[in-house]
Image (cartoon, rainbow, N blue to C red):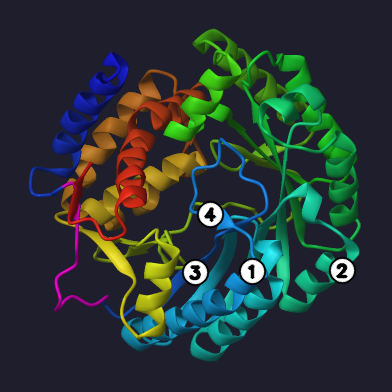
Amino acid sequence: MKEPRHWLAKKLTQAARRYLVGPEQRWIFERPSQDWSPPLIERTSLYLHVPFCRHFCPYCPYTKVPYQASLESPYTQAAMAEVDWWANTIGPAEITSIYIGGGTPTLALDSITSVLERVRERFHLSGDICIETNPADVNSEVIARLHEMGVALVSLGVESFQPRHLATLGRDYQPAVAERALSLLAESHFASVNADIMFALPGQTASEVTSDLEHAVQLGADQLTTYPLFTFPYTSVGKYLRLMSVRMPDLPTRREHYQAISRWCAGHGFERVSVWGFKRGGVPRYSSVTRDGYIGIGPGSGSHLPDGFVLNTFDLKGWEEAATNGRPAIALRMPFAGEMSGWWWLYWRFYDTRIPLDVIDAALGGDAVKARRWLKVIERVGLAARHDGFLELTEAGAFWLHLAQNYFALNYVNTLWTRARQEPWPKAVAI
């Protein structure tokens, strides 16, 4: 039986999106037609997914397989072939940023080096390269390789410096491992080093969260990304928590933690740059998600194109076979109708917590009046305030937006990804 709150969230989301976007937008991912191809694109970003992991964290929702050295070569060939396919279809676009995620990308540095070389050959790379890594995989050799590849921004999945919370998360190392990794990264002259810190963990206190933030900054982090465990409502997390006999914190606890994070960051010179993220000084902004458009390379990666979203098959072998044979590895597509592209742009500006008011008309077209009406409501109830031509979310606005993401948007991601994991090439998925 479905949980009542999930059923209610689904119904409320359906009503809201029908009103805002319009009835012509179909919220269904389907197999692309044989005659479909991506439109030509002048500028975009690129996401490279590396699916290999030595240890599977139970809260991680992304496509991953156990690492084996024998898997690297076929993955590399397929990824380079997919780069070629995109270049042949969208043209030699300018790539304004590259984000490398996983999995654990640093397990396959030879593969990444080859793929980046192919990207530079087929596209015009003008932006920064960002990469994720885990504490247990950071050493001087890895750091040297990252610099050789041109990586500018690094994000370390610290999550917590508290042993009991690391144990809850399935991390099989002591805090000293994360401490050494973060210090080493901070001393290695990257443009920015981000530390992921989790809050609202079972049994965690607000003071433990701010202690983790302070420790990360003392070790050299100049950006902080904070997020709760139950941001990801995936089945594996639910099973794990039931197995561990723990309960998730209630809403007041979650609110207390978020307020504590916001106060600590504001008091230590960190500005909010997204719902989850904070940075200090003039370092380049680190973000894993806020791109106006991107193409995805790798199994399970998605692409945000001018005419809609597409999603690669999650099956590693199926993705490799399609890509290496010059076929698109895209399993599902949801085309845009009406002003959907503009509404999606607005959604990510909310995620940024700053909406530029002077481009609303250009971005939303015929729906700009409707959008401005809703922005005024948000402002009147105290969730946002105007400042220098932007509508900026208040601390309360940022909190309620992140909560809405959990109960609304991410439930639909969960629906899509769960089906994509079960079937390599689904016929259709309604969200």
Residue type highlighted by circle 3: Leu
The crowding category of the residue bearing disc 1, from other C-alpha atoms within 10 Å (few below 14, some 14 to 19, many at least 20), is some
- Helix, strand, or loop for circle 2? helix
Q: Position of residue 365 (x, y in %)?
A: 21, 54
Q: Distance between the residues labelled 1 and 2?
A: 21 Å
Which quadrant of the rendered structure holds the C terminus? Answer: top left
- Helix, strand, or loop for circle 3? strand
Q: Which of marks 1 and 3 is in front?
A: 3
Chain part drawn in magenta: 27-38
Residue type highlighted by circle 2: Glu
Residue 264's image quarter?
top right
Residue 28 among magenta residues: yes
Q: Position of residue 253 (x, y in %)?
A: 59, 11
- The residue that disc 4 covers is 64
- Helix, strand, or loop for circle 4? loop
Q: Where is residue 117 in the image (x, y as percent from the top left)?
A: 61, 85
Q: Nearer the viewer, mark 1 or mark 2?
A: 2
Magenta stretch, overall SS: loop
State which tag comes first along the sequence, 1 or 2: 1
Tell me which residue sits at (84%, 56%) in the image: 185
- The residue that disc 2 covers is 141
Q: How far apart are marks 3 and 4 (CA)?
A: 19 Å
Residue type highlighted by circle 1: Asp
The label shown at residue 46 is 3
- Helix, strand, or loop for circle 1? strand
